[in-house]
Image (cartoon, rainbow, N blue to C red):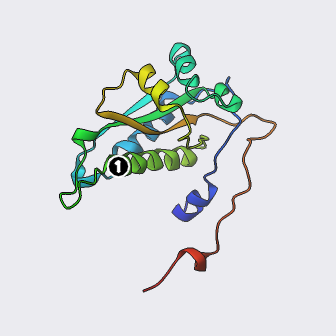
Amino acid sequence: MDFLELVKQRKSVRSYDPSRKVTKEVLARILEAGRFAPSATNNQPWEFLLISSDNMLEKIRSCYKAAWFQSAPHVLIVKGTRSKAWVRSADGYNALETDLAIAMDHMILAATSEGVSTCWIAAFDPVRLSAVLNLEDDEAVFAITPLGYPEQEGDGTRTKKRKPFDQVVTYL
């Protein structure tokens, strides 16, 4: 598939079929896309957590209570360690959030390419999630996403609205 078409095809799905698990082979390809994401000075300050067990899914679901999220058969979490990320000397900027966002985006696009639905979530309870995952003080999660297939009745997507090209692009 053409890359621009893949990007246009990606959508945030808010309706999952809990009975349709994603195969291990497909999940591995999605995770591999994250592994190959670029990071500042190639530090790769991340770890990808694939939640599929009923016990852990129940715990993770308590961190984001939207009804549609409760039915997703898998949840992908990208966590990172601040002390392992590149820091810009000029102002102390830590690239962890950028690195994790790039890895998550690679995996979400890979999922789209595989026909697997996602929805980027940042509105989770970070304190609760940190406790569930037993994160160290130096670790952070900036986004999570369900992985699965939409329900047959509809996928819960909204119409994509984008600003016109000339409102977001400036040639200098």
Q: Quadrant of residue 118?
A: top right
Answer with left or right where residue 42 lies relative to residue 10: left
Give x and y (percent) for residue 25. 47, 32
Give x and y (percent) for residue 170. 49, 81
Q: Is residue 84 above or below residue 131?
A: below
For this orientation, the residue located farthest to the left is 89
Q: Which residue is mark 1?
A: 99
Foreground residue among 117 and 99: 99
For this orientation, the residue located farthest to the bottom is 172
Give x and y (percent) for residue 52. 52, 22
Image mark count: 1
Q: Quadrant of the N terminus?
A: bottom right
Foreground residue among 108 and 24: 108
Residue at 42% x, 21% y is 131
Q: Is residue 95 above or below residue 149?
A: below
The crowding category of the residue bearing disc 1, from other C-alpha atoms within 10 Å (few below 14, some 14 to 19, many at least 20), is many
Residue at 59% x, 77% y is 167
Q: Is residue 169 above or below residue 101?
A: below
Give x and y (percent) for residue 121. 56, 40
Residue at 52% x, 17% y is 53
Q: Is residue 38 above or below residue 127?
A: below
Answer with left or right where residue 9 lies relative to residue 156: left
For this orientation, the residue located farthest to the right is 153
Residue at 30% x, 51% y is 95
**What kind of residue is marked 1?**
Asp
Q: Secondary structure at mark 1?
A: helix
Answer with left or right where residue 87 lies relative to residue 157: left
Q: Quadrant of the C terminus?
A: bottom left
